[in-house]
Amino acid sequence: MDFVRSDIQAYCEAHTTQPPSFLNELEQETWRKVIAPRMVSGAYQGRMLSTISRLLKPKRILEIGTFTGYSALCLAEGLQNNGELITIERNDELRWIHEKYFSQSPAAHQISTCYGDALSIIPQLDGPFDLVFLDADKENYLHYYEMTLEKIPSGGVLIIDNVLWYGKVTEPAAVGDIDTAILQDLNNRVLEDGYYEQLMLPIRDGISILLRR
């Protein structure tokens, strides 16, 4: 979902550098063969992730929620030569597409995928991480936020996807709408905690860029 006018969105996309061809192939194959393909980051959001990573030049990146691997490949573009990206995905049935496209990246040897429950995996990972991207199951967003707090140093960045949640966060959550309530709580929690400087952008379904104080 986009929150800007379609003509403005199209103009921005037309004036944004295009991704490598293998990422276009990954996006197309995601739409052809994977359930819920709308979850793929896509070219415009992917270039934003790539640009942030290139500016930050992280040594270590953690991604929570791999899906088909598009965002991981974009984030890996900014890794230092001796850096690493760890991405966590609970659905190991997507392994085939990860292996196919990760192998085409110049940073292939720097990417490792952990399959399983992120709530169990994250505590086993040693920090620090210079950049963390959160785009996983919404019901555990608050848990992931808390679990990564001590793994992100001052100057590190946490990027959270889907913070506008189809625009539902602007109104009281409907009875039983747990995901919307959790995202509202998280957005407020970030401001109240004061651990991060927060910038929320209306890109696709909303993205927050948080700078660790």
Image: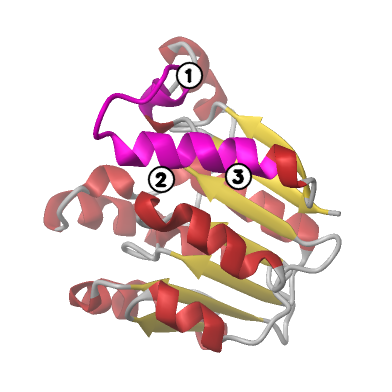
Comparing marks 1 and 2, which lies closer to the viewer? 1
Label 3: which secondary element: helix
Distance from Cα at disc 1 to Cα at disc 3:
24 Å
- Mark 2 neighbour density, 10 Å: few (under 14) some (14–19) many (20 or more): some
Label 1: which secondary element: helix
Please tell me whether residue 13 belongs to the stretch shown in magenta.
Answer: no
Q: Which residues are magenta?
A: 166-190
Residue 103 visible in the current orientation: no
Distance from Cα at disc 3 to Cα at disc 2:
10 Å
Q: Quadrant of the C terminus?
A: bottom right
**Image mark for residue 14:** none
Q: Amino acid at mark 3?
A: Met
Identify the residue shown where x is 47% and y is 58%: 71
Q: Amino acid at mark 2?
A: Gly
Whichever of callouts 1 and 2 sits on the residue coming sooner in the sequence is: 2
Comparing marks 1 and 3, which lies closer to the viewer? 1
Give the main secondary structure of the magenta stretch.
helix
Q: Amino acid at mark 1?
A: Thr
Whichever of callouts 1 and 3 sits on the residue coming sooner in the sequence is: 3
5 vs 207, left or right, is left
Query: For mark 2, what is the residue?
Result: 42
